[in-house]
Image (spheres, rainbow, N blue to C red):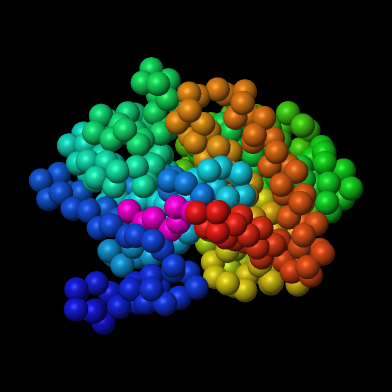
Amino acid sequence: MTDVTGAPADVLHTLFHSDQGGHEQVVLCQDRASGLKAVIAIHSTALGPALGGTRFYPYASEAEAVTDALNLARGMSYKNAMAGLDHGGGKAVIIGDPTQLKSEELLLAYGRFVASLGGRYVTACDVGTYVADMDTVARECHWTTGRSPENGGAGDSSVLTAFGVYQGMRASAQHLWGDPTLRDRTVGVAGVGKVGHHLVEHLLTEGARVVVTDVREDVVRGITERHPSVAAVADTDALIRVAGLDVYAPCALGGALNDETVPVLTAKVVCGAANNQLAHPGVEKDLADRGILYAPDYVVNAGGVIQVADELHGFDFERCRVKAAKIYDTTLAIFARAKEDGIPPAAAADRIAEQRMAEARVRH
């Protein structure tokens, strides 16, 4: 069913009427010459200009792309609030297979659309986009981060994203086992690409046992050849069932925690880099009911956004690293609030983030 504009009615209902909506602005962008079809979603500018990456992905439908942009933008509002940044939440998605569609012409057209928002939305990298892409986008748009050092940027943000997830794991270990070390703990990492392979390095340095999986066999092989102690399993379905797993780290696409995976998950902690890990509302309670500690994804994976936000002020890696290290304290504070309020950690994080955004709106 569609509305009078031809847009799927369920998308408009999500935007205007559901708890998952409440967005300030959604922009549909098209440049037929280059094949660009994009959605830019701005959830909130209460704390400052919306900041979030650009995902380039072959969605099954335009409606699916819009829904993803809405969900991701909302998540960025909460992530930026919990990271203590003076930024609201936004996200963009470009519809299509980046290996087939991505071109200089398309990225420049996309940059013009972002620029047309006049600074209400600041973009960066996400799945399917890279530093070189942001350099191209920046030729048309001042409000672009995640650029290369040669072009005044901070470069790859996955280093600090992984560092932040590692800090979240340490906080989870402290809360659950009374000791922040991951030495001799078994950690399963699903997705060892941009962020996951850096996380593996942190874990191995500390003496953890690591099990990995990824849809790309060559990526897994690269890890196991470099680190023979790392075990590999066929897929995520096998990983979540590994006997003796202490920590599960979803580091690929979202929706990893759902009605099928949570009942069979052997880990006591879930702490990973993927966005939107909870497939639907209620999964956080299912995890709590099974005694599984969930470190909210948008809290622990905020290292990357801390880095790209800093780029707007003249990038300093050490300053960012200090901020990202605070993810440890933030995660512990969320667990404490969850215990105090008798709610799951995901709900506690939401409450803290919503409080910060509400206070900002009052000040305005």
Which residue is pictured at 63% across the width and 29% down the height?
321
Horizontal arrangement in the rendering, residue 257 relative to residue 41 (left or right): right
Q: Position of residue 259 (x, y in %)?
A: 59, 72
Against 337, residue 323 (above or below) is above
Look at the image and give the residue range highlighted in magenta.
Answer: 40-46
Which residue is pictured at 58% across the width and 50% down the height?
81
Asked if the magenta segment contains residue 44, the reply would be: yes
Asked if the magenta segment contains residue 281, the reply would be: no
Horizontal arrangement in the rendering, residue 41 relative to residue 108 (left or right): right
Q: Residue furthest right?
A: 178
Which residue is pictured at 72% across the width and 49% down the height?
331
Q: Residue furthest left?
A: 33
Quadrant of the image occupied by residue 85: top right
Q: Residue furthest front?
A: 363
Against 151, residue 60 (above or below) is below
Quadrant of the image occupied by residue 281: bottom right
Q: Position of residue 284 (x, y in %)?
A: 66, 67
**In the foreground, 339 or 219:** 339
Quadrant in which the N terminus appears: bottom left
Q: Position of residue 176 (x, y in %)?
A: 84, 53
Q: Main secondary structure of the magenta part?
A: strand
Against 330, residue 311 (above or below) is above
Quadrant of the image occupied by residue 62: bottom left
Q: Position of residue 102 (x, y in %)?
A: 25, 40
Asked if one can make out residue 20 in the rendered structure from this viewpoint, the answer is yes
Asked if one can make out residue 77 in the rendered structure from this viewpoint, the answer is no
**In the foreground, 20 or 23:** 23
Which residue is pictured at 28% across the width and 57% down the height?
27
